[in-house]
Amino acid sequence: MLTLLTAALLSFSDPAGDARGDGGYVLPTRPAVSEDALDLRSFQAAPQGAGMRFTVGLGRIENPWDAPGGFSAGVTDIFVGSSLGGQRTLDGLRLNTSGGGWDYHLRVTGFGSTLEQVPEGGGTPLPLPAPTVRVEGTSLVVDAAIPPGEYAYWVTSSVYSPLTADGVLRPGTTPGPTNLQAGRADAPVPVDVLLPSGEGSPYTQGTLAPVGQTRDHRTLVLVALGGLGLLLVVVATVILWRRGP
């Protein structure tokens, strides 16, 4: 039955030129960060050994803060989950999920990346071994200790800043060369999100829909096993009845 839960390659594309939030975000100019360096272009998820590999395509790679990882313009957050349980708030990003909750959260920066998991039954996420990240062309390749499986994904791109506790520059209404400016003080933090086709804008609705597997196959497998067991009982009963005493 494990083969029923094995992940296959999932690939999604995202429009170019939309890394300005609701369209009105003003990016910082000190240091200068291009829109392309924050622009999500593609996302892939596939099993890799005992874990998962995520490939995040960007418009370009920039390193304005001279990070050892070779990139530092943005912060990429990947939330991984299913339709059962999980967290419904995207950690500190001023967005909620739709279509389920997340169980794992990867935060990827050029100065170090983290992975955490929501414990069974809920509660404060717990740290797991840090993922490995490398740059390939204009993509970030992330290997994480997440069991292979079919998941739902919420993927966001935010502006990096070493001047905040978590490295994420949050938008506000105050203009300035080091600020990320938006039309309202509580605007969502990411400047770009991986958005399923036809979904409403998270910048007006406050929720982000997932891509990928939004149905939990564990439930389907249990139902299938129950049905198979019932069928076997019926078949055995019919055979015994035909044989007679």
Image (cartoon, helix red, strand yellow):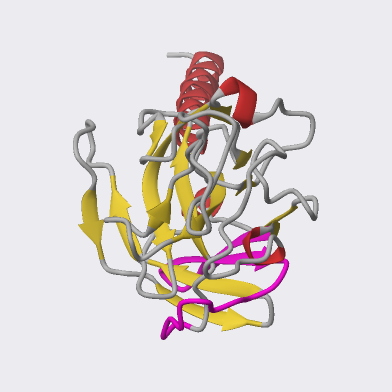
Q: Is residue 40 above or below residue 225?
A: below
Q: Position of residue 219 (x, y in %)?
A: 46, 29
Q: Residue at x 55, y 49 (%)?
A: 156
Q: Position of residue 188 (x, y in %)?
A: 51, 35
The reply to whether residue 228 is visible in this rendering is no
Range covered by the magenta-colored residues: 42-69
Q: Residue at x 27, y 56 (%)?
A: 165
Q: Is residue 135 above or below residue 227?
A: below
Q: Position of residue 31 (x, y in %)?
A: 53, 70
Q: Position of residue 127 (x, y in %)?
A: 22, 57
Looking at the image, residue 212 sits to the left or right of residue 116; the answer is right
User: Between residues 95 and 115, which one lies in front from this camera angle?
Assistant: 95
The reply to whether residue 161 is visible in this rendering is yes
User: Between residues 80 and 92, which one lies in front from this camera angle?
Assistant: 92
User: Between residues 70 and 66, which one lies in front from this camera angle?
Assistant: 66
Q: Is residue 228 above or below residue 110?
A: above
Image quadrant assignment for residue 119: top left
Looking at the image, residue 91 sits to the left or right of residue 21; the answer is left
201 inside magenta stretch: no
43 inside magenta stretch: yes
Q: Residue at x 63, y 43 (%)?
A: 25
Q: Residue at x 68, y 76 (%)?
A: 138
